[in-house]
Structures are given as C-alpha cells and as structure tokens.
Amino acid sequence: MRFSLVQIQSIVEINRCGFHVSKAAQKLNTSQSVISKHLKSIEDALAGKLFSRSGKRLTGLTDLGQKVLQYAERMVENHDSIDRIAKEADSTERETLLLATTPTLARYLIADTVQRFTTAHPDVQLNVRVEESDKAVEAVQQGLSSFAVVPIARAMPSGLSFCELTTWSRLLIGLSNCPLFAEQAMTLERIAEEPVIAFETPTVSLQEVFLAHGLQAKIALTTSNPEVMKAYAALGLGVAVVAAPTFDADRDAPLISRDVSGLFPSVRIGAVQRADSHQTLAQTQFLSYLRSNLAAKDRTSDG
C-alpha cells in the first residue's frame, strides 16, 4: 500500500507535538478526526500500532512506530527541502530563515551578524529561536528550525551535520581581593578550594572538569547565564569560569580575569542542520556573514 504525504505528515506531527493529536491537527491546519483517520489507516495497513496508548490518549512510540518514524521524518524533510528550493526559485516569494541558538550565543556571537544580514536582505524573514542548546538541536531535528548555532561538547545526534565556526576559551573572573588572583600558577586544585560559580548546560558541564581530575569543587551556584555569573562574582560570592567573549574588563569592572584556557577545555561552536536538508541560499549567506564577522574579530584581537 502507498501512503500519501499528508498521512506521513500526520505521524511526524503527532510525534513532534508530544503525542497530542489536537495539536498536530492545528499544526497541519486540519481537524483532529482527520489526523486520527490518517493514523488508523496506516496502522491498519501495517497491522500494528505506531503509538502506545492509555485509554484514548497517545503516550509514546511503539517499536514499530520508531522504525516507521525515521523514514517518515526523512520523507517530510525531503518534501520541505523541495518546498524551500521552490520558494528560493520564486523571486516573488519571501523566504523565511529559521535559526535556533542559545541565549549566550544570541547576545555575544550572532547579534551583529543578524543586524548585518537583515539589513542586507530585507526580502528574507529571519526568525531567531532562543533556547538552551539541547532544545535548539531538537528544533532542527524536528524541522522547527532550518539550522542551529550551538556549542558542541558531546557527540552529535545521528542524522545531523555539524560545521565548526569558532572556539571560545575560558577566563576565571572574580574580585581583585580574592586570594586566587595573587597565585602565580593557577591550578584546578586551587580553584576548587574557592566557591565556584559554575557554567552548566545540557551539553557543557564545568563540574565534570573537576570530577575528571578527582576534585570536588565548592559549587556556589550553577547557571547557563554569564550575566548571572558575573553579577554573583561581583558580589564576592565566588569566582566564575566564563567564556572569554562574554567578559569585558571595562564593562564588567570591578571584576578582573585570568586566562584558564589551559585548565578548562575550549567550547566548540558550530552550525548544525539535518544531514538530509537542503541548505538555502539565505542560510549559506547568513553563515558567510557570520564567518566574516568572526574572522574580523579574530584579526582585531590579534592586533
């Protein structure tokens, strides 16, 4: 039996909407009964259930559903890629570029690129989705974003491609009266003795660095927000390890910094997209602008 694209889209959208049939119907601009009918026809043809149920409520994917979904998502993504190619070819169609990124990268990495791109390409509707790194990657997997600019610290999920853009080194920041800043040689052991304001996200963990060296740091606060880290450090509540681009000696005074790039791994930052997705001209241009801005910043810092 051959299945129609709308039937396949129904399966994919139910999964993306957390197994809520009503939400999937809204996304596809149809009724709940139509979505249910599509699901039933596919399950009847396969002689098995794609979703587990509790009463009338869908609760998850069955083993059969997981097998089918990977091909269904690929079909929907291929259709979306063709749609993007068609819109790109139609000069009267305004293209929409969906970008996902983290709060820190939205402020400290891509803001000037967003400004430059939107000024140069008023015909492109750029939509920036700001989420934690794992949610930004999920948005790409689910087709909610064209691509994501995120920090990468662990293995990339299958089905995604990753293009490295830059790396961020680490600084230790705190008040000048903290004894740490009088040390000639900074060590993890010595830092672990002070209250530490730790950077934590689903993909990057400062605590893991200490644990990997058999150290139990005195964690005073965990957050993914560098502004919170700097605010607490300025109150004398601990020292913080932050990404170098998020700290400015003049703007963030009275905090001072020390380079600890030899103690803490740099953060790799790159662009993530589905491996089977078409990269539109607008996406290529945005990444070109971003690389150009990063290269300019590197030249300035070297100078």
Image: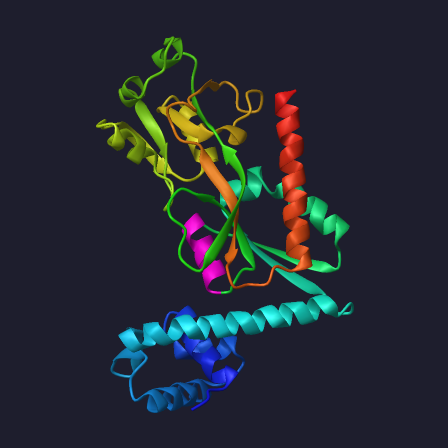
Q: Is residue 178 above or below residue 267?
A: above
Q: In the rendered image, which quarter contains the C terminus?
A: top right
Q: Is residue 120 left or right of residue 257?
A: right
Q: Residue at x 45, y 76 (%)?
A: 24
Highlighted range, magenta: 133-142
Task: Find residue 53 and report its image quarter.
Answer: bottom left
Q: How many marks?
A: 0
Q: Position of residue 188 (x, y in %)?
A: 31, 21
- 88 and 236: which is toward the camera: 88
Observer able to see residue 62: no
Q: Position of residue 83 (x, y in %)?
A: 63, 72
Residue 135 among magenta residues? yes
- 60 and 226: which is toward the camera: 60
Q: Position of residue 95 (x, y in %)?
A: 69, 64
Q: Is residue 103 left or right of residue 192?
A: right
Q: Residue at x 66, y 46 (%)?
A: 288
Q: Residue at x 50, y 77 (%)?
A: 26
Q: Is residue 287 left or right of residue 275?
A: right
Task: Find residue 38 and report its image quarter.
Answer: bottom left
Residue 82 among magenta residues? no
Q: Position of residue 194 (x, y in %)?
A: 30, 20
- 289 and 239: which is toward the camera: 289
Q: Is residue 255 above or below residue 152?
A: above
Characterize the magenta stretch by its predominant secondary structure. helix
Observer able to see residue 191: yes
